[in-house]
């Protein structure tokens, strides 16, 4: 490992110009050689997504974005970085105008969305330069980050070959997250939250000392704030536990961000930008005899499917089902395969699509009523619930589907049972 420390600042850390002062403070007080990854400024990506639906409003949008970014760095257009800033806005205008004529052009859509991060990297680099950091904006497609064919992850082997390390020296790089090029050299964006993945990929490729995701929350909480329950910040999560929580719907974590770090020994920290004290570190899993629940996740609107196969056909049937599911972008929350049987939990909103897929394969299946999926995260948890519609136990999570109408009360009972309240 070397001295790189990857700092990722998301849109929640770029709400108001004053956030830049706190970002500067964090960089000054953190050991190691900083590499900064940024998302678009707060709200910009949502505005660009809306603009794709109504590109004829391009002039108002571009003018608004210009003003929003100049509030963060007044006078930017008169600085050296001003030419790059103006050029990015001009390119955005051109993409939106072209989209008026080619509304289904995916390359134009991706190019428009990437402009949020491009503008943000210019603004943050200039703001930090004024505060004494010798920074340079670096665009991730120029840097050489390669997005995989499914658009959900970064191709690490290819990116390791393509990455232009000279762009990372000698000035402190401020890298635009969330996008890169596909294998054909065309701009492609990741799923939402992809800037975390950009940071994790760079940490892995550069063998960084650590990676810090700066957020507006104090690390990973045992229970999502949506339930109105004061729960604990988890001080340490093993990588497999963190993956289980992310896959079960953890709002702060993205599974694709953790996966590149598996086996690297690089710790991932999730810290609040504006608070000191507690935070979460994600690192190697530690074997323990303590079967303690670390976190609880609850996802409403889930259906359980039981798919029947002949024993010898289970593996091939499973591969076929999962292949079709990936093609049709059906989200599978949990899956369990045994001889002659495949069980999975999927969103009820996608049930009709999955029915058609299974019927096209002449599969015999049953499905449950719509319920809520409760996931208890921890190592080798044993949780039995007689009223569960169905359950699946994994190494680092225990899942059960329930039709309990009062979910808030159920979550509160589980929080009390496993001592997760503050």
Image (cartoon, rainbow, N blue to C red):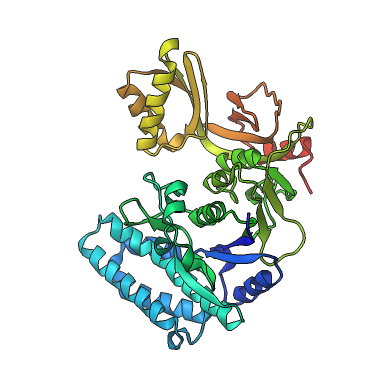
Instruction: Give percent across and percent down for residue 124.
Output: 53, 74
Q: Name above or below for residue 100 compared with residue 84.
A: above
Instruction: Report which quarter residue 377 is drawn in.
Output: top right
Q: Name above or below for residue 77 compared with residue 261.
A: below
Q: Residue at x 46, y 86 (%)?
A: 79
Residue 77 at least partly seen: yes
Q: Which of 29 and 227 is in front in this view?
A: 29
Q: Nearer the viewer, residue 203 or 163?
A: 163
Instruction: Report which quarter residue 81 is drawn in.
Output: bottom left
Q: In this view, does 241 lie to the left or right of 365?
A: right
Q: In this view, does 279 lie to the left or right of 255?
A: right
Instruction: Report which quarter residue 352 is drawn in.
Output: top left
Instruction: Give percent across and percent down for residue 143.
Output: 43, 62
| The N terminus lies in quadrant | bottom right
Q: Which residue is drawn at 60% across and 51% down?
A: 252
Q: In this view, does 93 lie to the left or right of 9?
A: left
Residue 352 at least partly seen: no
- Number of on-image labels: 0
Q: Which of 229 and 278 is in front in this view?
A: 278
Q: Residue at x 30, y 24 (%)?
A: 360
């Amino acid at each position: 490992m070397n001295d790189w420390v990857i700092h990722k600042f998301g849109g929640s850390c770029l709400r108001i110009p004053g956030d830049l002062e706190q970002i500067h403070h964090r960089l000054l007080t953190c050991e190691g050689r900083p590499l900064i990854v940024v998302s678009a400024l707060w709200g910009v990506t949502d505005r660009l997504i809306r603009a794709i639906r109504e590109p004829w409003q391009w002039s108002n949008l571009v003018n608004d974005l210009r003003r929003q970014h100049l509030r963060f760095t007044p006078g930017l257009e008169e600085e050296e970085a001003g030419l790059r800033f103006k050029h990015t806005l001009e390119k955005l205008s051109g993409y939106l105008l072209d989209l008026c004529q080619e509304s289904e052009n995916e390359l134009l859509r991706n190019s428009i969305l990437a402009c949020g991060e491009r503008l943000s990297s210019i603004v943050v680099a200039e703001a930090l330069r004024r505060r004494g950091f010798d920074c340079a904006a670096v665009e991730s497609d120029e840097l050489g980050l390669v997005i995989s064919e499914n658009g959900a992850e970064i191709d690490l082997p290819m990116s390791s070959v393509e990455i232009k390390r000279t762009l990372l020296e000698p000035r402190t790089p401020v890298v635009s997250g969330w996008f890169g090029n596909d294998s054909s050299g065309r701009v492609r964006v990741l799923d939402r939250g992809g800037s975390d993945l950009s940071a994790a990929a760079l940490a892995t490729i550069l063998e960084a000392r650590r990676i810090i995701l700066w957020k507006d929350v104090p690390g990973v909480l045992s229970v999502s704030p949506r339930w109105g329950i004061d729960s604990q910040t988890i001080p340490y999560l093993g990588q497999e536990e963190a993956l289980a929580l992310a896959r079960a719907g953890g709002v702060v974590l993205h599974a694709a961000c953790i996966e590149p770090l598996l086996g690297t020994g690089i710790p991932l920290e999730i810290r609040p930008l504006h608070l000191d004290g507690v935070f979460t570190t994600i690192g190697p899993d530690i074997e323990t005899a303590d079967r303690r629940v670390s976190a609880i996740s609850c996802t409403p609107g889930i259906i359980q499917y039981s798919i029947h196969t002949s024993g010898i056909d289970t593996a091939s049937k499973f591969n076929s089902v999962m292949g079709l599911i990936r093609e049709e972008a059906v989200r599978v929350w949990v899956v369990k395969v045994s001889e002659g049987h495949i069980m999975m939990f999927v969103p009820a909103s996608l049930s009709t699509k999955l029915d058609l897929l299974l019927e096209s394969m002449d599969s015999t299946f049953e499905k449950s009523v719509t319920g809520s999926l409760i996931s208890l995260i921890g190592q080798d948890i044993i949780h039995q619930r007689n009223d569960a519609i169905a359950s699946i136990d994994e190494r680092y999570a225990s899942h059960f589907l329930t039709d309990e109408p009062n979910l808030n009360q159920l979550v509160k009972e589980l929080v009390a049972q496993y001592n997760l309240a503050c």
